[in-house]
């Protein structure tokens, strides 16, 4: 399966790219507004995998080209770029595409990080509103520590919560998440439940900042 990680040069994009390339046989494509940056990062990821005895080809393109013919497109971009990114790639999406968003809106002040809920209700719902009508949207991978995800020596042992109104799209993303060793996907309902999930991210960051040894904090439901 072809997975395009738009913003795949950033922290969460790096972690997902490395994990999918390391643990699965999916075709991983890195997207960026700057195609040269995408290609350079793709080569870095290949080098990291080669150092672990894994020979994988990872390609890098401008976002719209990366999204073209991808079955799953992950918007690994900051919340304030999601709408512009969806607009830029809209012609590369079709009714077979599943659009995945892990973005969370946050603000920071002297007390720490706080959830910045957009007018649409959540960033996930903002993406759904910007996406073409025939493209399914799934919220996933919101609460993952990027450093822990990108460290292939780290045992994850954490959960990710999935929200979507299209059960088939949610099931596809569940299977992709299960392909990452140590990551357990859990169904959290429809898109309307995204605010509660997104709001966990600033909470986890605040806990990590204020407690020694918890810099790569994750969530596990037992």
Image (cartoon, rainbow, N blue to C red):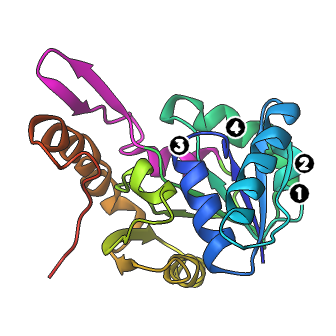
Residue under the image location 80 percent in, 44 percent down: 89
Q: Magenta segment: does it hold 123? A: yes
User: Which of marks 3 and 1 precedes in the sequence?
Assistant: 3
- Read off the residue under disc 3: 11
Is any part of residue 62 visible from this angle?
A: no
x then y, percent, for residue 181: 47, 80
- Read off the residue under disc 2: 65
Q: Nearer the viewer, mark 3 or mark 4?
A: 3
Q: Cβ–Cβ below 8 Å for labels 3 and 4?
A: no
**What is the magenta range?**
104-130
**In whole angstroms, how far apart are the C-alphas of marks 2 and 4?**
12 Å
Residue in the foreground of this view, choosing between 129 and 48: 48
On-image quarter of the C terminus: bottom left
**Residue 99 appears left or right of 139:** right
Q: Cβ–Cβ below 8 Å for labels 2 and 1?
A: yes
Residue 68 numbered tag:
1
Residue 87 numbered tag:
none
Q: Magenta segment: does it hold 106? A: yes
Q: Label 1 neighbourhood size at 10 Å, few (<14), some (14-19), many (20+)?
A: some
Residue at the far top in the pictured view? 110
Q: Is residue 1 above or below residue 133?
A: below
- Read off the residue under disc 4: 85
x then y, percent, for residue 34: 82, 29
Q: Secondary structure at mark 2?
A: helix
Q: In which quarter of the view is residue 94 placed?
A: bottom right
Q: Label 3 neighbourhood size at 10 Å, few (<14), some (14-19), many (20+)?
A: some
x then y, percent, for residue 188: 32, 73
Residue under the image location 32 percent in, 50 percent down: 198
**Residue 65 appears left or right of 115:** right
**In whole angstroms, how far apart are the C-alphas of marks 2 and 1?**
5 Å
């Amino acid at each position: 399966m072809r997975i395009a990680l738009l913003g795949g040069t950033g922290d969460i994009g790096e972690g997902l790219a490395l994990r999918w390339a390391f643990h699965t046989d999916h075709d991983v494509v890195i997207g960026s507004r700057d195609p040269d940056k995408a290609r350079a990062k793709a080569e870095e990821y290949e080098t990291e995998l080669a150092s672990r005895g894994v020979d994988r080809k990872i390609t890098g393109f401008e976002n719209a080209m990366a999204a073209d013919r991808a079955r799953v497109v992950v918007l690994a971009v900051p919340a304030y770029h999601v709408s512009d990114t969806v607009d830029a790639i809209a012609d590369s999406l079709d009714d077979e595409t599943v659009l995945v968003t892990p973005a969370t809106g946050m603000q920071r002040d002297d007390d720490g990080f706080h959830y910045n809920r957009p007018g649409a209700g959540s960033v996930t719902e903002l993406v759904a509103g910007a996406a073409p009508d025939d493209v399914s949207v799934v919220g996933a991978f919101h609460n993952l520590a990027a450093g822990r995800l990108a460290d292939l020596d780290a045992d994850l042992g954490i959960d990710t919560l999935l929200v979507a109104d299209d059960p088939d799209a949610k099931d596809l993303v569940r299977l992709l998440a299960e392909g990452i060793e140590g990551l357990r996907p859990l169904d959290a309902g429809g898109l309307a439940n995204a605010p509660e999930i997104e709001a966990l991210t600033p909470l986890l960051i605040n806990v990590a900042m204020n407690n020694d040894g918890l810099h790569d904090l994750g969530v596990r439901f037992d």
